[in-house]
Image (tube, rainbow, N blue to C red):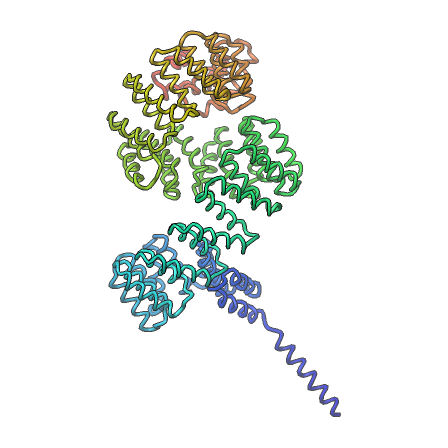
């Protein structure tokens, strides 16, 4: 009997224990959420996992979504934070904390009115909420209403004297009044509440630095990084601080600590290399990078980054060797295919199109959807004027990767070439949007707009790009060019003034020189270009501008003397040497010019411009045969060079050897089928000198891309070949467009009159 009783008690205990262990999904979710909140300040990454686990248990747990928003805030992922906060408000429109956070995001982004809207809404829901009061205080501080800001912060402290955020706001107000000691006092009060409050600590470091207490700032920074050992970005900022303080070795130690303690992370390695390149020079930075790659042979992301360094140092042999090594070791996996595609890209840059196509074919045979290879294949198709094939491949890429800026940009180019203007514009706009107006895509697009005289659209795009990339020199130059083209001289000067003290480049002086030319103030212009040259002696834009001013004023001696000094300073500046030879020729010193061209060809036999300009000088001297001989000599050394082949075709035209010229243009169109100049010249010769119907029909087909051009000469050629092909309505349409764009061109009027 006693035994049965014990058994019953034991069974009861098992049942009770079992019941205790069977938590509901809601209870499990709450445990995950609570753990996430305890980890939020010390380890946001782990906190994120806990909040995600909570949502696995309870998908509609709003507080867990809000927790993820707090993690995103701590990790500076502002778009993600904003999206998550809106998700919270979709579920709970009166979630005050989420409303406050969105208001803070708008305030940080400078969207003051939107921040006020959120603050007013939060005030209606919970007017005495500390977060609401502090948001309103922050807005008041932004509007320089210090009295209101301080009053609201103190109102919070009266209710809760342990509110660290209120002390942060009071410190900000004191700093605005240039009272750093008082600001530091408020920060210390906040830190007494929570020593690990990162915002307070970083503000303290900033104020200590401002007030000249560098040692104390460094000591505080060291303490903070020790509080947050897992925060890589914090230690990176500490390294920057040390570097700015002149403590290079200490900065390097911090960066090496990150590499040693995060062996699988790429970013710390790249940051260390960037530091070494900047501080110790290209040789040391490269050596460290190569050492890293040797120690991590299977880290192909690291190897690809080293390839980028080689390319930036213009060491093509090293980059090709490493890419081929990756191809060999990685085989047919994604890294191997990526490397093979990059090798194909290099081959294209070297005009080895067939070898490049072969490699791309091999990649696509292993993975028919490999994005990089499809994009490269599409680029080749566009270059070969196979626009429909390119469009099909690019659409395939965009199905899998709808936000591929490169694919969108190429698709826009393909549409543009087929005359689908609205589709091209739509794709260009998407490419800019997904790339966040990256200069890589914006610059060629704007150049295309400028060529088509769509200047208003070009300026709007450039203004957006420069807002996001204010220090990009190429973008700034392009905006200045646009200002000058539209006659906005004052706008160009304003840009020059704005960057005068903000850049180490010579751009401000170049702009001032260009603006002064527009004002016919050649003395000021020359002085500005001379300053630009002194700052950047190898910048040919400054050199060309100085020479042009001298030549326009017939000051040949000054131009020669200046260029001779440029060449003496840098004998390897072949552009300057070619320009000097041209100046000798224009000044009537032909023997000196020819002697200079010959010396350039001897010292730089693969410099195509030397052969080209030497030939031009001989054409000017009426020695066409000598010009042809020079170009042919260049083509022996640099076979299939596009510029030299084009020059040879033009020489044949001078000699009225039209059959030979057509042969060269045929060759050029095989090298680059999308070259509108080669198409125009070929079609022009056929329309004027060929009577064979089949050749005329082929030329008419080749001329179709010319119809989409804004260049009047191209439109004239398209119209004239349409006439020769018997397409009279098309001919009239194209020739009328050409006349409208170039009303003073007699040849176009003649063609239209026919």
- Residue at x-position 69% and y-position 86%: 9
Closest to the observer, 257 or 57:
257
Q: Quadrant of residue 13?
A: bottom right
The image quadrant of residue 462 is top left
Viewer-side residue, 39 vs 299: 299
x 41%, y 21%: residue: 577
> In the rendered view, does 6 fall on the left or right side of 639?
right
Give x and y (percent) for residue 264: 57, 52
Q: Where is residue 698 in the image (x, y as percent from the top left)?
A: 55, 17
Q: In this view, does 401 lie to the left or right of 436?
A: right
Seen in the image, is 321 located left or right of residue 610? right
Q: Where is residue 733 in the image (x, y as percent from the top left)?
A: 43, 20
Compared with 122, 711 (above or below) is: above
Q: Nearer the viewer, residue 505 or 332?
A: 505
Task: Please say whether residue 733 is visible from this viewpoint.
Answer: yes
The total number of labels drawn is 0
Q: Quadrant of the N terminus?
A: bottom right
The answer to which image quadrant residue 223 occupies is bottom left
Q: In which quarter of the image is the C terminus?
A: top left
Residue 514 visible, this angle = no
Outermost residue toward the bottom in this view: 1
Q: Would residue 251 be found to the left or right of residue 5 on screen?
A: left
Q: Is residue 175 above or below residue 534?
A: below
In the image, residue 285 lies at what x, y percent? 49, 43
């Amino acid at each position: 009997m006693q035994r049965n009783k014990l058994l019953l008690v034991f069974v009861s205990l098992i049942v009770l224990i079992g019941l205790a262990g069977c938590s509901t999904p809601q209870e499990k979710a709450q445990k995950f959420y609570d753990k996430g909140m305890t980890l939020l300040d010390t380890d946001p990454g782990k906190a994120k996992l806990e909040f995600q686990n909570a949502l696995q248990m309870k998908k509609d747990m709003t507080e867990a979504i809000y927790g993820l928003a707090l993690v995103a805030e701590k990790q500076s992922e502002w778009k993600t934070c904003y999206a998550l906060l809106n998700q919270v408000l979709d579920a709970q429109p009166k979630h005050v904390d989420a409303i406050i956070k969105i208001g803070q995001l708008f305030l940080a982004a400078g969207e003051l009115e939107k921040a006020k809207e959120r603050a007013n809404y939060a005030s209606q829901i919970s007017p005495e909420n500390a977060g609401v009061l502090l948001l309103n205080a922050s807005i008041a501080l932004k509007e320089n209403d210090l009295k209101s800001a301080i009053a609201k912060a103190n109102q919070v402290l009266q209710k809760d004297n342990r509110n660290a955020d209120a002390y942060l706001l009071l410190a900000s107000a004191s700093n605005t009044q240039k009272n750093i000691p008082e600001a530091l006092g408020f920060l210390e009060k906040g830190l007494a509440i929570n020593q690990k409050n990162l915002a307070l600590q970083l503000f303290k470091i900033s104020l200590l630095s401002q007030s000249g207490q560098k040692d104390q700032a460094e000591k505080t920074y060291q303490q903070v990084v020790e509080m947050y050992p897992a925060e890589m970005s914090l230690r990176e900022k500490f390294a920057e601080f040390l570097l700015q303080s002149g403590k290079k070795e200490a900065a390097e130690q911090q960066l090496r600590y990150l590499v040693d303690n995060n062996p699988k992370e790429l970013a710390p390695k790249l940051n260390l290399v960037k530091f070494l390149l900047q501080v110790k020079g290209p040789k040391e930075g490269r050596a460290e990078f190569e050492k890293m790659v040797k120690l991590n042979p299977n880290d192909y992301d690291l190897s690809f980054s080293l390839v980028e360094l080689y390319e930036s140092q213009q060491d093509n042999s090293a980059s090709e060797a490493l890419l081929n090594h990756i191809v060999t070791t990685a085989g047919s996996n994604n890294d191997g295919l990526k490397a093979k595609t990059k090798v194909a890209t290099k081959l294209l840059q070297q005009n080895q199109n067939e070898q490049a196509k072969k490699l791309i074919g091999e990649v696509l045979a292993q993975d028919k959807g490999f994005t990089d290879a499809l994009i490269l294949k599409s680029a080749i198709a566009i270059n070969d004027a196979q626009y429909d094939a390119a469009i099909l491949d690019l659409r395939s890429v965009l199905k899998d990767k709808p936000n591929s800026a490169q694919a969108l940009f190429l698709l826009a180019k393909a549409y543009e070439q087929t005359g689908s203007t609205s589709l091209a514009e739509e794709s260009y706009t998407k490419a800019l949007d997904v790339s966040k107006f990256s200069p890589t895509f914006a610059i060629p697009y704007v150049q295309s707009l400028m060529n088509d005289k769509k200047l208003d659209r070009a300026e709007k795009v450039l203004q957006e790009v420069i807002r996001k990339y204010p220090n990009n020199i190429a973008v700034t130059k392009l905006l200045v060019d646009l200002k000058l083209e539209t006659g906005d001289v004052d706008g160009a000067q304003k840009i020059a003034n704005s960057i005068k003290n903000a850049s180490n480049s010579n751009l401000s002086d170049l702009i001032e020189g260009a603006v002064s030319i527009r004002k016919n103030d050649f003395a000021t212009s020359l002085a500005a270009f001379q300053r630009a040259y002194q700052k950047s002696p190898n910048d040919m834009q400054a050199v060309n501008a100085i020479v042009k001013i001298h030549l326009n004023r017939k000051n040949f001696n000054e131009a020669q003397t200046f260029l001779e000094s440029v060449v003496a300073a840098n004998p390897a500046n072949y552009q300057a040497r070619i320009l000097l030879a041209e100046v000798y020729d224009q000044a009537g010193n032909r023997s000196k010019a020819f002697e200079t061209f010959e010396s350039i060809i001897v010292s730089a036999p693969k410099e195509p411009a030397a052969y080209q300009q030497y030939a031009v000088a001989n054409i000017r001297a009426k020695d066409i045969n000598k010009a042809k001989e020079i170009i042919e000599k260049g083509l022996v050394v640099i076979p299939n060079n596009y510029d030299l082949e084009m020059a040879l075709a033009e020489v044949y035209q001078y000699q009225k050897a039209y059959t030979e010229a057509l042969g060269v243009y045929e060759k050029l169109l095989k090298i680059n089928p999308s070259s509108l100049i080669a198409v125009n010249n070929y079609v022009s010769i056929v329309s004027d000198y060929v009577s064979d119907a089949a050749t005329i029909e082929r030329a008419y087909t080749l001329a179709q891309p010319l119809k989409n051009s804004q260049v009047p000469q191209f439109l004239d050629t398209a119209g004239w070949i349409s006439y020769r092909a018997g397409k009279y309505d098309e001919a009239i349409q194209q020739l009328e467009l050409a006349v409208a764009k170039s009303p003073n061109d007699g040849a176009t009027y003649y063609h239209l009159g026919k």
